[in-house]
Each structure stands twice: as C-alpha cells, then as structure tokens.
Image (cartoon, helix red, strand yellow):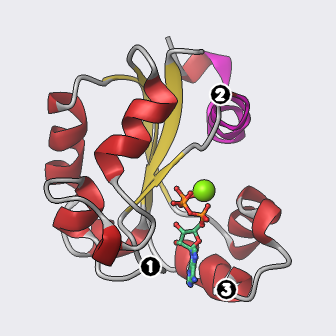
Amino acid sequence: MSNRTFTMVKPDATGKGYTGAIIDQIIKGGFSIKAMKWTKLTKEQAGEFYAVHKERGFYAELVEFMSSGPIVAAILEKDNAVADFRKLIGATNPANAEEGTIRKNFAASIGENAVHGSDSDENAAIEGNFFFSFLERF
Ligand code: ATP
Ligand code: MG
C-alpha cells in the first residue's frame, strides 16, 4: 500500500469554476499536495493517458472531452491514498455517487465527471510520472 495517488480536475469542472472548491474538499479530506499544475492536454496526450480504454465505446468521446479545456493535475499524499481518494470522489457515474462525494457535488454525467482518481498504486505512479518531473514534486 503506497501513500500517494494522482488526480486531475477535469475540463467540465475547471470550466464551471469548481477548481478551488474541489481542491478545498481534497485538502479537507486529509490529502496533502505534493505536486500540482494547471495545463491543457492535446488529443494525443489525452489518448495516451487513457490508452487503457482504447477499445471502449466511449474512448473517442473521452479523449475529445479531456482535451477540450484546462485541467489541474496533482500528486496527493495520505495513508491509503488510492482507496481513500476513490472514496472521496465517489462512483464514476455521479448518479450513483454517495452524498457528499466530489462527483456527487460537482459532476454532471458519467462522461463529464469532474475528477480523475488513480485506480491502483502502480497506475498512481505511472500517471504522476506522466505529468511531473522529479524537480516538480517533493
Ligand atoms: P477516472 O479513471 O477518470 O478516475 P473511473 O476510474 O471512475 O474514472 P473509468 O472506468 O476508468 O472510471 O473511466 C474513465 C473515464 O471515462 C470516466 O471517468 C469517464 O470520464 C469516462 N467514462 C467511463 N464510462 C463512460 C461511459 N459509459 N460513457 C462516457 N464516458 C465514460
Ligand atoms: Mg479509471
């Protein structure tokens, strides 16, 4: 069990002005920020980041959406980070997300669901390395 996970505030949420409120909920949830940047993915970068979903019907829509506006990428630290962060963000589909979770509070649909959270320690490390050099984290 590692103590780090990776997140993005997705383009729907940055576009609606929810970035500050989402980061506030993450910090109040007990996570500390080890790296953070405001950036925008190209289609190629979004496609590479979500390559694991290449065969899924929603892949083209996902790549289009994730490159449609700015995102905030961050590496977060907390005991049991991956599992606890998935709990804080709630189910992929906000309609099924528990009350008080970030997706329940800020997401509009299963596609445009406000935040990303790594699904394993291994992917948290891969995803953090995708965005941040070792000079950009501590
Ligand atoms: P994420 O990886 O972004 O944290 P997740 O792990 O909850 O989300 P995944 O199954 O990994 O869910 O799907 C990745 C992303 O693809 C979802 O967050 C969502 O933006 C999009 N997605 C998933 N299922 C659908 C769907 N049925 N229709 C449209 N988009 C979808
Ligand atoms: Mg996922």
Q: Which residue is located at x 65 percent, y 17 percent?
A: 134
Residue at which label 1 appears: 110
Say which label, 1 or 2, has the lower sequence index: 1
The residues tagged by marks 1 and 2 sit, at their Cα atoms, a distance apart of: 24 Å
Q: Secondary structure at mark 2?
A: helix
Q: Is residue 72 visible?
A: no
Q: Which residue is located at x 45 percent, y 20 percent?
A: 80
Neighbour class for label 2 at 10 Å: few (<14), some, many (≥20)? some
Neighbour class for label 1 at 10 Å: few (<14), some, many (≥20)? some
Where residue 32 sits in the image (x, y, percent)?
31, 20
Q: Secondary structure at mark 3?
A: loop
Q: Is mark 3 within 8 Å of ligand 1?
A: yes
Q: Is residue 115 visible?
A: yes
Q: Is mark 1 within 8 Å of ligand 1?
A: yes
> On the picture, is 99 further left or further right than 73?
left
Q: Which residue is located at x 33 percent, y 51 percent?
A: 89
Residue at which label 2 appears: 121
What is the number of the mark on residue 31? none
Where residue 102 sits in the image (x, y, percent)?
25, 55
